Amino acid sequence: MRAIAHFINAKSVSEGARKGQVFDPNTGAVQAEVAFAAAKTVDAAVAAASAAFPGWAATNPQRRARVMFAFKALVEKHMDELALLLSSEHGKVIADSKGDIQRGLEVIEFACGIPHVLKGEYTEGAGPGIDVYSMRQPLGVCAGITPFNFPAMIPMWMFGVAIACGNTFVLKPSEKDPSVPVRLAELMMEAGAPEGVLNVVHGDKEAVDAILAHPEIKAISFVGSSDIAHYIYSHGTANGKRVQAMGGAKNHGVVLPDADLDQVVKDLVGAAYGSAGERCMALPVVVPVGKKTADGLRERLLPEIERMKVGISTDPDAQYGPVVSAAHKAKVEGYIGMGAEEGAELVRDGRGFKLQGYEDGFFVGPSLFDKVTTKMRTYQEEIFGPVLQIVRTESFEEALALPSQHQYGNGVAIFTRNGRAAREFAQRVNVGMVGINVPIPVPVAYHTFGGWKRSAFGDTNQHGMEGVKFYTKVKTVTARWPDGDVGDQSFVIPTMR
Ligand code: NAD
């Protein structure tokens, strides 16, 4: 059986009595065992990162950027191998696995520009002979804790920016698909990052708790479900750390009566069912305004769903593959049953889906609910599977209120030809990322990613300038170089008059 080890100081380390199983979601079989870190292993990773920090922080930003350039080239060279590995543990199809890696690489491209981004501010002559300048300095050892659903992109969101800023890093990826993060760390070493700059420890709550408690870790970035995000945020900050913790989502797509329904349906099927709905920026709720819009949408959606091809993750014709685990399949199917019991109309039931030859795989067929209401638990909670819910509304105001009042506020989309309505929606909606005729509005790498409400705890977003702010602290220097008498002593706070 393949063994997946920790990666500390550029070496494989497989200590620890506890292990987890890594499945192939296509077949349902165990394909590897992953070592689970106890506090001792986390200590070793932090010690490696601490030892590497002074040298890395003192490495000039251009040299750090060169490592990022080399890393990007290496990831591109290994794209096929990485995508296959990712897809074999996650279950997303190869093209989507490449997309996962590519979106991470776009953050690495941003990190390649770090010398420019880290330039501080300077005021010449803030007072007589006085100049003021500020600089952004790295924090030290930073940690990232990542979810299963983007095993390449989300680690790169974090370590790409943190390391380019001069920090060293300990990554605790999801124990469900841990292989790609280790490969990325190996490629970082090959790209020229010194030993200890990026370490990977695997595990579950025990490893995470050791990270939360470790006094040497200055900042923690987390992405995962909301209850865990809140736990990480409250414990991490109580321990004096800087924390950003992104949580779950329930993104709505509002469809106004003037929208191009054929285009909306094309966008919707990809955004709702792509990656088996296991995206925090998936669009699992569609909110048509008016009966005609709702009926037109449903009528066009059904044949698209019937045509959809669910297959193994290496099938080039499959639109989506299995969900990540048997437990997750059971959870999604449980929600489908609950939705029917709650009184929503189950138009298409994906439970019990079997793929010939892969009967033990974790597949869920595409499901569609109509006449979902806000009182239903299946509306209020995140399902994170290939399930689309139609919530019918009568007006723009009613549609705007739904995502605004939902507990989650990650992403939202509006589909319309009316620029004024779209503008008003974008301004007023209580959600962090908005798409206008864009179903999955994940911002480009040089902007920033982050939701509102229970979709994010903390006050900085991922990547872009917000990421740089998160991984650096500002120092401001006020310097006086008088060319003569500096005046009398004064007991009054200095002011600029
Ligand atoms: P998860 O919360 O189960 O796990 C995330 C990380 O937390 C993993 O590394 C896991 O090992 C660790 N963890 C799990 N249980 C823990 C516990 N009790 N104590 C401490 N650590 C624990 O999330 P997941 O199932 O891997 O990922 C799916 C979730 O992530 C969804 O809710 C999805 O919406 C969310 N997500 C959010 C974003 C975002 O940016 N907002 C992006 C991707 C995924």
Image: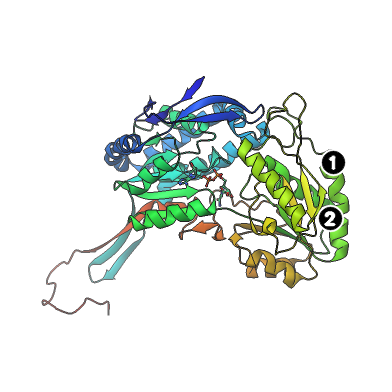
Q: CA distance from mark 2 to mark 1?
A: 18 Å
In the rendered image, the vertical position of residue 395 relative to residue 240, given as above or below? below
Residue tagged 2: 261
Q: Position of residue 165 (x, y in %)?
A: 39, 46
Q: Earlier in the sequence, mark 2 or mark 1?
A: 2
Q: Position of residue 325 (x, y in %)?
A: 61, 36
Question: Who's the residue at 65% across and 35% down the image?
Answer: 92
Q: Which mark is residue 208?
A: none
Label 1, residues with CA under 10 Å away: few <14, some 14-19, many ≥20: few
Name the residue furthest top.
1
Q: Say which amino acid is labelled 1.
A: Glu
Q: Position of residue 80 (x, y in %)?
A: 60, 26
Question: Who's the residue at 14% across and 78% down the image?
Answer: 491
Question: Who's the residue at 62% across and 35% down the image?
Answer: 97
Q: Say which amino acid is labelled 2.
A: Leu
Question: Who's the residue at 78% across and 53% down the image?
Answer: 369
Residue tagged 1: 306
Q: Position of residue 135 (x, y in %)?
A: 33, 55
Q: Find numbered disc 1 in the image and state the secondary structure of the residue it sits on.
A: helix
Is residue 472 among the parts visible in the rendering?
yes
Does 68 sit left or right of 84 as displayed?
left
